[in-house]
Image (spheres, rainbow, N blue to C red):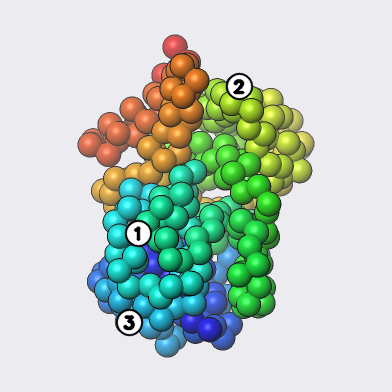
Amino acid sequence: MTIAVYGAGGIGCYVGGRLVATGTDVVFVGRQRIRDEVAAHGLHLTDYLGADLRAEKVRFEITPDAAAEADLVLVTVKSAATEAAAAELAGVLRPGALVVSFQNGIRNGELLRDRLTQQTVVTGMVPFNVLNRGDGSFHQGTEGGLDIQGHPDLQPFTEAFRRAGLPLTQHADILSVQWAKLLLNLNNPVNALSDLPLRDQLSQRDFRRCLAAAQSEALDLLTAKGITPAKLMALPPSRLPAMLRLPDFLFRRLASKMLAIDPLARTSMWEDLQAGRRTEVDYLNGEVVRLAESLGRTAPVNAKLIELIRAAEAGPRKAWTGADLFAQLTR
């Protein structure tokens, strides 16, 4: 049984690295820069619960044909690269291989399915944050296993993921799970613009009000579309905005689990801005804007977050205060 990780960045190296460290045969396909880093240091995988795993002998390649004999392919490229990845994989994967989209956004599984007609494609979701510390070290800073669209072809692989500490939770309705995760990911631009670790940012009411505004806008649109997001946390998604708007002392008391985050945890969007890369904001807040357009409506809060992130990508960047950002989003 061979697993390929296609697009081995933060999520790919972390998930694949834990599989390797616990005895599964994995080949990574990614950029030369990360290959050189892994060749020099191996992979070091840690999490907020104290896990500390190392994978010293790592197969890391830079060409698509490295995935040719894989039984399972985990696609972890950025959303903007999905179509290119699908075209590359279509030319090399064996018929019948199982392909899982472990990516942000809503539509990546469909894009892969349209191109990979001889393979089985299922949609997955990674609910936790991974911080790239450099030198082959990747850290999971928030809770969660792996969520995935239920399929019988997953059965041979479930034990490997359980052994790696990343159990697969299978769902009959993966779209509702994706939207539930996307509601949480609407915080990514807020966190990136704050230039703060997640726990520090979520500890401040004004930043939480920004997230609540983006979520409320999305929830109204989802209701109009007839989509009910799955309950991934103790609190139903529909009640999250009210919780986020609470004063700090009440929020700390009633939502302490939301603040039980590793102090190192940040969002991938913050990492992208730091590295000068284009972010995935079009596949997060952009999905809310597209949903609004499909209903003949607008989503001004999420549209403004996209605008601010685009400005940050172009530079120069500023660290927003919660009050200033909330004023921008609601004026």
Tag shown at residue 70: none
- The residue tagged 1 is 86
**What's the CA distance linking mark 1 and mark 2?**
32 Å
Q: Residue at x 41, y 81 (%)?
A: 69
Q: Percent x, y for residue 236?
A: 73, 36
Which quarter shows the C terminus?
top left
Disc 1 or 2, which lies upstream in sequence?
1
Instruction: Name the one closer to the observer, 85 or 28.
Output: 85
Q: Quadrant of residue 195?
A: top left
Q: Which residue is mark 2?
A: 224
Relative image position of residue 161 (x, y in whole percent): 62, 73
Q: Residue at x 34, y 65 (%)?
A: 90
Asked whether the beta carbons under mark 1 and mark 3 sit within 8 Å of each other, the answer is no
Pointer 1 with pointer 2, Cβ within 8 A: no
Residue type marked 2: Ala
Give the alpha-carbon distance from disc 3 to disc 2, as whole Å.
50 Å
Who comes first in sequence, dot 1 or dot 3?
3
Circle nearer the N terminus (3, 2): 3
For this rendering, which residue is in front, 98 or 324?
98
Residue 273's place in the image compared with 5, above or below, is above
Foreground mark, 1 or 3, reads 1
Under circle 1, the secondary element is: helix
Q: How many marks?
A: 3
Residue that mark 3 sits on: 39
Is residue 78 placed above or below 27 in the rendered structure?
Answer: above
Crowding near pointer 3: few (<14 within 10 Å), some, many (20+)?
A: some
Q: Nearer the viewer, mark 3 or mark 2?
A: 2
From the top left corner, tell me how far across and down residue 111 is, in percent.
Answer: 41, 50
Residue drawn at x 37%, y 31% as measured from the top left: 306
